[in-house]
Image (cartoon, coloured by chain):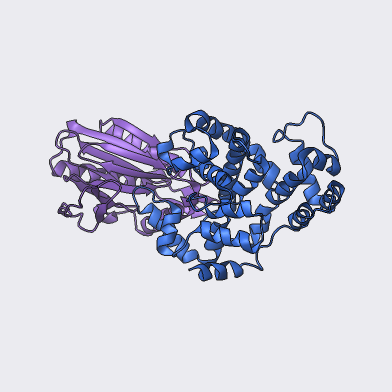
């Protein structure tokens, strides 16, 4: 089964690639000999990223009081590893344009991902020891395996969606995929993250967002994305009743150290109020 | 977990409806596709998924006989989405869907004064298209009012597809709004249904369904 997933992901290697600006900044962040001005210089060399970076830096997303008008200032205020997260977050949607499909519109797909990202960021600020920007990016990427499956295995993917609609109680999509395909989009996304050599935290969050138990290296982050994914569904169908969506593993709440009664409603409402602006910031052309 | 019970006999005329045991609801369940309807006296549930289409759930609250339909008024599919067809010819399809459901309930022991009506669906699930969902809602409400019946519960309109599960014996309904991941699949099912009703001439009578 694992080799099937590996082959599937290898098959899209030419169609979708990691954004260059992320790859270069990632190398610098991982290089102990690089400094902050190297990172600012690399970021500045990509004009479209510069525009997006300054737009995000000056938005209510960060809420800095002073104007951030240069890339070096943005890097020093926001932080180098956060700039790396932003480089991925602001470029990843367009890099998947090479993987079109007929099952879901890209707009609908990325809106769910963005809801998940906004909620992960909100929860990460409240939970201890979580980097909100890294969690934002992990959550934004959590379903990328779906785009691979929808593009490469459209008939089986469609059969999975029909199985969900035929189930009467809305069987989770990943379970339907396991039945019709033999594996699911979380496994495929995890493999894509490995082949892309994404930071291991992102890889675990993507691979285990439906089942937090196997996550050994980053259990807290994985649990947070697991929760954010379900709350994103609530935000999307505009409900505050957890019974309307798939259940959250109670262990996930323990791992992040938050209580659903205290954070669930406010996180959903806050994400709903932020989503239109965030769509412009992250996906605006 | 309840043990699956043998599938009870379907009422005459409904043998073709797909049915089976559903673990989640611990009941036998009949699956309606667009254009179908189902009436039962048994303790079983009826379920369907709705985009712009509408379902009326009607039962006799005393005898428990009841059923569900699933229909939409014809519209044409153009570049910008679905367009409404002329009203007089198109309401004919809605009239048939509602009439058949009510007539079958009466035929199987229902009384008009005991009927309890609920309606669901009519979502505007594609942006920038004529709101055919609202047209279906308006039709259903008008029809029900004209028949002197009253809607006791509804979840209609808005932008979501829905999954509806109805238990005629108790009148219980479970409505789940569906995420947009399912929109295209449901639009495709409803478009295929639209083509089948458009191809049939709107003359004569009952053969339309």
- Which color has been applied to chain B in this rendered view? purple
Q: Depth check: B167 or A249 in front?
A: A249
Q: Is residue B148 left or right of residue A154?
A: left
Residue for point 45% across, 61% down: A158
The chain assigned the colour blue in the figure is: A
Q: Quadrant of the C terminus of chain B?
A: bottom left
Whether A52 is drawn above or below A181: the answer is: above
Return the x and y of residue B203 as percentages of the image width and height.
Answer: 31, 54
Q: Residue A242 in the image: x percent, y percent?
A: 43, 36
Q: Is residue A44 left or right of residue B98?
A: right
Judge whether residue B194 can be spotted in this image: no
Relative to A30, residue B163 above or below: above
Pick the front one: B79 or A122: A122
Q: Nearer the viewer, residue B194 or B51?
A: B51
**Which residue is at 53% across, 31% downward?**
A263
- With respect to residue A19, does B71 lie above or below? above
- Quarter location, residue B171: top left
Residue B186 left/right relative to A18? left
| Res. B180 visible in picture | yes
The residue that appears at 34% across and 57% down in the rendered structure is B201
Residue A85 in the figure: left or right of residue A249: right
């Amino acid at each position: 089964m694992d080799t099937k997933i590996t082959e599937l992901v290898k098959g899209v290697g030419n169609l979708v690639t990691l954004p260059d600006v992320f790859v270069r900044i990632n190398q610098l962040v991982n290089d102990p000999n690089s400094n902050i001005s190297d990172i600012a210089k690399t970021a500045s060399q990509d004009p479209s990223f510069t525009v997006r970076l300054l737009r995000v830096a000056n938005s209510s997303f960060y809420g800095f009081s002073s104007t951030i008008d240069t890339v070096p200032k943005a890097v020093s205020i926001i932080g180098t590893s956060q700039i790396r997260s932003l480089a991925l977050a602001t470029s990843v949607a367009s890099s998947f344009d090479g993987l079109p499909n007929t099952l879901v519109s890209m707009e609908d797909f990325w809106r769910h991902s963005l809801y998940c990202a906004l909620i992960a960021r909100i929860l990460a600020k409240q939970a201890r020891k979580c980097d909100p920007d890294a969690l934002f990016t992990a959550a934004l990427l959590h379903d990328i395996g779906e785009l691979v499956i929808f593009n490469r295995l459209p008939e089986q993917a469609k059969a999975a969606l029909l199985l969900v609609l035929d189930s009467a109680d809305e069987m989770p999509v990943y379970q339907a995929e396991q039945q019709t395909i033999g594996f699911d989009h979380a496994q495929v996304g995890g493999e894509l993250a490995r082949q892309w050599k994404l930071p291991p935290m992102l890889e675990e969050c993507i691979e285990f967002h439906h089942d937090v138990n196997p996550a050994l290296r980053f259990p807290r982050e994985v649990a947070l994305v697991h929760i954010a994914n379900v709350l994103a569904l609530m935000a999307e169908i505009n409900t505050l009743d957890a019974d309307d969506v798939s259940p959250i593993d109670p262990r996930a709440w323990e791992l992040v150290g938050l209580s659903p009664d205290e954070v669930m409603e406010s996180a959903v409402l806050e994400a709903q109020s932020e989503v239109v602006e965030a769509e412009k910031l992250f996906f605006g052309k | 977990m309840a043990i699956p019970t043998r599938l009870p006999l379907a009422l005459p005329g409904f043998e073709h409806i797909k049915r089976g045991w559903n673990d989640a609801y611990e009941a036998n369940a009949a699956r309606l596709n667009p254009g179908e309807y189902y009436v039962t006296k048994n303790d079983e549930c009826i379920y369907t998924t709705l985009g712009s289409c509408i379902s009326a759930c009607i039962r006799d609250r005393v005898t428990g006989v009841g059923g569900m339909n699933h229909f939409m008024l014809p519209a044409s599919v153009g570049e910008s989405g679905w367009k409404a067809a002329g009203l007089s010819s198109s309401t004919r399809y809605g009239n048939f869907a509602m009439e058949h459901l009510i007539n079958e309930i009466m035929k199987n022991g229902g009384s008009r004064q005991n009927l309890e009506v609920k309606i669901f669906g009519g979502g505007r699930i594609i942006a920038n298209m004529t709101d055919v969902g609202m047209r279906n809602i308006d039709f259903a409400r008008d029809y029900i009012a004209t028949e002197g019946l009253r809607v006791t519960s509804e979840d209609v309109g808005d932008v979501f597809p829905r999954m509806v599960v109805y238990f005629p014996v108790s009148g219980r309904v479970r409505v789940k709004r569906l995420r947009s991941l399912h929109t295209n699949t449901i639009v495709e099912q409803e478009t295929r249904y639209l083509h089948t009703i458009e191809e049939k001439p709107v003359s004569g009578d009952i053969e339309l369904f």
